[in-house]
Image: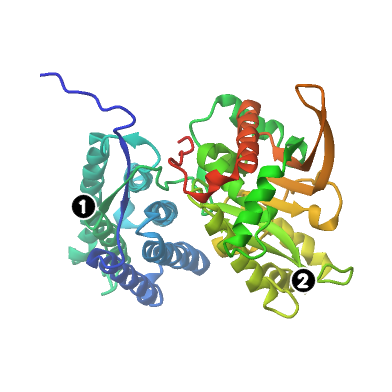
Amino acid sequence: MEKKRKTDAEKRYFAYGIRKQNVFLWAAALFVAAAVAARIVYYSSPAGKPENISSFLVTVIFLILPCVCSLAFAVKLIVFGEKRLYKTAKPVAFYAVYLSARAVALYVSGDKRVGSGLLATALIIAYFALAVIYRLTVSTGGRKRSGISARRIVCACCFLLALAGQTVFELLPLLREDTGTAPFHSEAAIALDILAVLAVLAGLKLRKSERPLPQCGDRNDGRRVRSLDPLNGVAVYIMPDRCAANNLFKDSFDCAAADAYIREKREEGLLHFGYTHLLLAAYARTVAKLPSVNRFISGQRIYSRDDELEISMVIKKDMTLEGSETIITIYLDPHDTAYTVYEKFNREVEKAKATEELDSGFDKLAGALNIIPGVFMKFTVWVLKTLDYFGHLPRWLTKLSPFHGSMFVTSMGSLGIPPVYHHLYNFGNIPVFLAFGMKRRENELSADGAVVQKRCIDFTVNIDERICDGFYFASAFKYFKRCMTDPKRLDTPPEEVNCDAE
């Protein structure tokens, strides 16, 4: 009987994880701690200095590097094991580098255990093969499938067999009487690290989702989009800077329906409900329907924020020339309604205005950076840019930064002027800068030839053209205008929240 193939709609996303309550996780951490202790004890003794190898190389290759890799593996396992287990693949890869360097060093020193160049080469190949197989095993969340494929199971079985063989090879010197091994031999430490990885594999739990799950290559603030056309992959190198790839857009909307909606919300008790709340709710609804506008580019790669919107905005405590100002970040969700947007926005504003100096987390961070002398400040910014390029800026730092997010919004209407065309920032990853101005009157001819006066609000958008094509942007702005001119749809959550491409 022919099996029925599952469609993409029936397929789901799968990934592995290991919870903190899992006993195998803590067993792995215990094995890692024991391995680190074994190395420190052994290489601190005279027996732990292989012949013809300098003390400096012994310290770096045989002690510091493996201890760092082992501890990094344990920390990442505890912190990211449940939702981002793939982060443990990097320490395993560095550990393979260490083991390869160790095999070469022992071979050069004439160690009996690696007496053959062929054996040393085979060990190096095995180490890197194990690292690759481990990465394939723990990173499975980016593609739709009907289940974990048989190839994954075969890889896991080969991995277990290879680890078992490697464990036997490393433990053999412990059983030989002529090796003169110390009680805490380096092979025992390697065996303990292997047992830690085995414990992780034994405790893996399968996660299922209708949305893409995190995998290797993703950032802590976004998921890499891998299914784009080749042109998108080339464009980010042809136009590497955000400011060189920006497009300017200007439009307006009739504010009659919006004014009536705002009055209605204020009568319901939503004090000071205004155009900022309405605009943010309309943009969140736009992302729910057209999620690709919530992408960003970093390190010449395109990422999607999926269901998280980070909106940055400047606020002033007093509308005076001397009034202090700061930048706040509002975290929205495509499922949000006008009511939830109102609550989230007001909460952030009240939190910022609660301090006498109107200091946000970014202000404190900027104050700390200002302590750095000018000569070293440029180097500090270069380091931050480099870390950001490779996606290694800590999440707490990108949350403080107003240059990392989905969109920057500025209200020119409160200043009584038309909207400006604000530039994008090369630092960070914000792809959209939206400004809206004050109300203005406009005369328009009706169908019968009469002159009708209406009130409009202009808005300008500066967008990074590399995140999606022009047709998609046009569709997004048309839908955004429909939400502003028919705001009652924002009272209820969207019927469906679309998912960005894989």
Q: Position of residue 195 (x, y in %)?
A: 25, 61
Circle count: 2
Please say if 315 is above or below 137: below
Quadrant of the image occupied by residue 173: bottom left
Query: Which of the numbered marks, if any, corresponds to residue 317?
Result: 2
Q: Residue at x 60, y 63 (%)?
A: 270
Q: Secondary structure at mark 1?
A: helix
Q: CA distance from mark 1 to mark 2?
A: 65 Å
The label on residue 400 is: none
Q: Quadrant of the N terminus?
A: top left
Left or right: 233 as drawn, with respect to 193: right
Figure quadrant of residue 497: top left
Residue 170 percent across, percent down from the top left? 26, 58
Q: Is residue 452 left or right of residue 164?
A: right
Q: Quadrant of the C terminus?
A: top left
The three-letter code of the residue at mark 1 reads: Ala
Residue at coordinates 33% horizontally, 67% vertically from top-left? 32
List the residue tagged with mark 1: 164
Name the outermost residue toward the top.
Answer: 2
Q: Is residue 314 left or right of residue 406?
A: right
Pick whichever of labels 1 and 2 is earlier in the sequence: 1
Label 1 crowd (10 A; few <14 / some 14-19 / many >=20): some
Please state which of the two labelled residues, at mark 1 or mark 2, is closer to the viewer: 2
Q: Amino acid at mark 2?
A: Lys
Which class describes the residues within 10 Å of circle 2: few (<14), some (14-19), or many (20+)? some
Which colouring convention does the figure follow? rainbow
- Asked if residue 241 shows in the view, the reply is no
Under circle 2, the secondary element is: loop
- Vertical order, 54 against 109 (above or below): below
